[in-house]
């Protein structure tokens, strides 16, 4: 999405796609500043002042969860720059509300907005554990590490109530199936009993994503994720229980968080992380205008600098989806970020990828509820 055209208004840069913001009181604890219509919708709506002096104050936005009945639960991909072939997403949408989340555009497939809808109108898949058992029990299934948390966080706040992730882990543990988990939540510690037992068999590893160590910035950017100190504490607890844990500097945001790369890695290593990785900020589709509106609200003085650096790493655009470039970018500034990360990780002895998880221990579930073969 190319947004090179910038206009001037009252001395403040304005993005080409500017949304009418939702009243701040309504979106307390939310990151998105607006709720634009989904890109597949036939009409768009825009707020405006009609001149009527009527108090239209509305209560704060609440989180609404609907049940989604998916036909299958294991998603497969062949992307050459993604280090996994299979993944599971127990939830659609994410209450943590990270403004930069590349998964936001997926809400468009539900006829909803990538903005506040993505943070407040969520979908849970309570049948996921049963479906997983059915798929693992299929004749000919071969175990390969399943990644969970690659799209939305499986330990987002609603997991406290729905407990879908824990049930998925119970199925995987029973089948001795390897799993890798990415999260920003300390709720992962709730499942220490299962994770510790799986770790003893080399069946699990966890990556804690840390974008910044600045609590104020994290609060604005990732409003319902665990605080940076809490994430580091979670790494320490996981490591103390013998669970392989890594740290992901993700995403790296130029001129906003990139100066923290070394500090984040130092802190992760001190807490017990064994591995490290990073991903450059990605702004696909609706994410670009949403991020720019957020940037104008919270850091207007850095708007031009941040966007200029982003475009310098994306071929002059807000985003380049080309494989081998979308995760790391290109150009001198992207090269500098990569070298800084590599040198720091090497100095600290942090592996880019740890040892592979065991796939030879897999035992298919008993097949309860699966369709029997005809012959």
Image (tube, grey):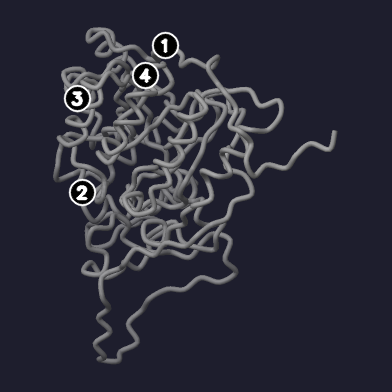
SS type, badge 2: loop
Disc 1 and disc 3: Cα gap in Å? 20 Å
What kind of element bears circle 3?
helix
Indicate the quadrant containing the C terminus: top left, top right, bottom left or bottom right.
top right
Residue 228 figure quarter: top left
Residue at 22%, 42% (x, y): give it. Answer: 226
Q: Distance between the residues labelled 4 and 3?
A: 31 Å
Tag 1–tag 4 contact (CB < 8 Å): no
- For image coordinates 35% across by 49% down, the residue present is 159
Q: Which of marks 1 and 4 is nearer the N terminus?
A: 4
Residue 317 visible in the current orientation: no
Which residue bears the numbered disc 4?
Answer: 335
Rendering coords of residue 229 (x, y %)? 15, 35
What number is the disc on residue 236? 3
In front: label 4 or label 3: 3
Is disc 1 in contact with disc 3, using a CB cutoff of under 8 Å? no
Label 1 sits on residue: 355
């Amino acid at each position: 999405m190319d947004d090179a055209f910038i206009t001037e208004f009252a001395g403040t840069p304005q993005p080409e796609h500017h949304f009418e913001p939702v009243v701040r009181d309504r979106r307390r604890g939310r990151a998105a500043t607006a709720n634009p219509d989904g890109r597949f919708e036939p009409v768009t709506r825009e707020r405006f002042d009609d001149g009527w002096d009527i108090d239209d104050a509305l209560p704060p936005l609440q989180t609404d969860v609907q049940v989604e009945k998916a036909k299958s639960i294991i998603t497969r991909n062949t992307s050459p720059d993604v280090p996994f072939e299979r993944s599971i997403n127990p939830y659609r949408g994410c209450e943590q509300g990270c403004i930069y989340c590349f998964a936001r555009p997926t809400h468009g497939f539900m006829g909803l907005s990538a903005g506040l809808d993505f943070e407040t109108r969520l979908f849970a898949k309570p049948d996921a554990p049963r479906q997983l058992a059915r798929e693992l029990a299929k004749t000919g299934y071969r175990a390969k590490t399943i990644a969970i948390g690659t799209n939305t966080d499986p330990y987002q706040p609603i997991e406290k109530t729905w407990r879908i992730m824990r049930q998925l882990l119970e199925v995987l543990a029973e089948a001795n199936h390897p799993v890798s988990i990415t999260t920003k939540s300390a709720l992962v510690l709730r499942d220490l009993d299962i994770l510790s037992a799986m770790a003893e068999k080399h069946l699990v590893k966890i990556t804690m994503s840390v974008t910044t160590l600045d609590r104020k910035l994290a609060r604005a950017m990732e409003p319902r994720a665990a605080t940076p100190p809490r994430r580091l504490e979670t790494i320490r607890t996981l490591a103390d229980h013998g669970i392989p844990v890594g740290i992901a500097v993700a995403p790296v945001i130029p001129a906003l968080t990139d100066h923290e790369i070394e500090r984040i890695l130092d802190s992760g290593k001190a807490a017990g992380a064994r591995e490290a990785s990073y991903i450059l900020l990605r702004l696909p589709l609706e994410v670009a205008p949403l991020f720019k509106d957020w940037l104008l609200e919270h850091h207007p003085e850095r708007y031009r600098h941040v966007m200029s650096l982003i475009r310098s790493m994306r071929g002059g655009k807000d985003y380049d989806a080309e494989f081998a470039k979308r995760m790391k970018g290109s150009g001198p500034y992207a090269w500098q970020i990569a070298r800084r990360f590599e040198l720091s990780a090497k100095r600290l002895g942090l592996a880019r990828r740890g040892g592979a998880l065991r796939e030879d221990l897999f035992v298919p579930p008993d097949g309860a509820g699966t369709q029997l073969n005809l012959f």
